[in-house]
Image (tube, helix red, strand yellow):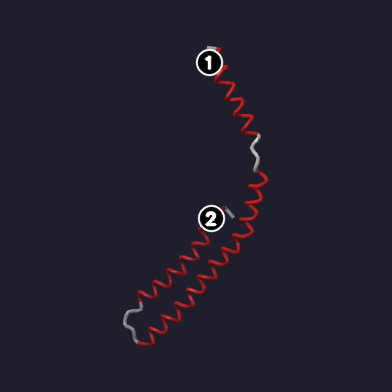
Amino acid sequence: MNNKIRRLLLPLLLLAIAANAQPGLNEMQQAQQSLTQSFFSALDCSLVVAAIFGILGAVRIYHNWQMGHPRIDQAVAAWFFAALFMVLAGGFLQAVFGI
């Protein structure tokens, strides 16, 4: 039985030594800093795209309304939810990455 314990104990000790010798902590911190710095520009970009969707949607809906198109409800919903999706996508990415 002692022989079985020794055979099991030796690989576990070597595994523990190898686990402590893993490089990459500095690289992971640098990647996190890079993600933090570039993420806010991506969040701002999603808000800008949402604003563009809102403005373009308002102009197109106003034009269709003035031209007398009978059904503009679908266009209103489509443009509204496109802009809402972009706003929520930025918040979702912020929550996922924990920034």
Q: Is 67 located above or below residue 49 in the figure?
A: below
Q: In which quarter of the image is residue 19?
A: top right
Which residue is farthest right?
26
Q: Residues within 10 Å of mark 1 (few under 14, many from 20)?
A: few
* 2 or 1: mark nearer the eye: 1
Q: In this view, does 48 lie to the left or right of 57?
A: right
**Residue bearing mark 2:** 95
Mark 2–mark 1 Cα distance, whole angstroms, equals 48 Å
What label sits on residue 4 in the rendered view?
1
- The answer to whether mark 2 and mark 1 are in CB contact below 8 A is no
Q: Which residue is drawn at 55% across and 17% down?
A: 5
Q: Is 25 located above or below residue 89 in the figure?
A: above
Of residues 24 and 78, the one drawn nearer to the viewer in this rendering:
24
Q: Quadrant of the C terminus?
A: bottom right
What label sits on residue 94 in the rendered view?
none
Of residues 28 and 75, the one drawn nearer to the viewer in this rendering:
28
Position of residue 13 measured from the top left corner of the image (x, y, whole percent): 61, 25
Which residue is farthest left?
70
Q: Is 15 located above or below residue 41 in the figure?
A: above
Residue type of the residue flagged with mark 2: Ala
Residue type of the residue flagged with mark 1: Lys
Position of residue 8 measured from the top left corner of the image (x, y, whole percent): 55, 20
Q: Residue at x 54, y 68 (%)?
A: 47
Q: Which residue is drawn at 48% across and 75% down?
A: 54
Q: Residue at x 62, y 31 (%)?
A: 18
Q: Earlier in the sequence, mark 2 or mark 1?
A: 1
Position of residue 26 measured from the top left corner of the image (x, y, whole percent): 68, 46
Q: Residues within 10 Å of mark 2 (few under 14, many from 20)?
A: few
Of residues 69 and 17, the one drawn nearer to the viewer in this rendering:
17
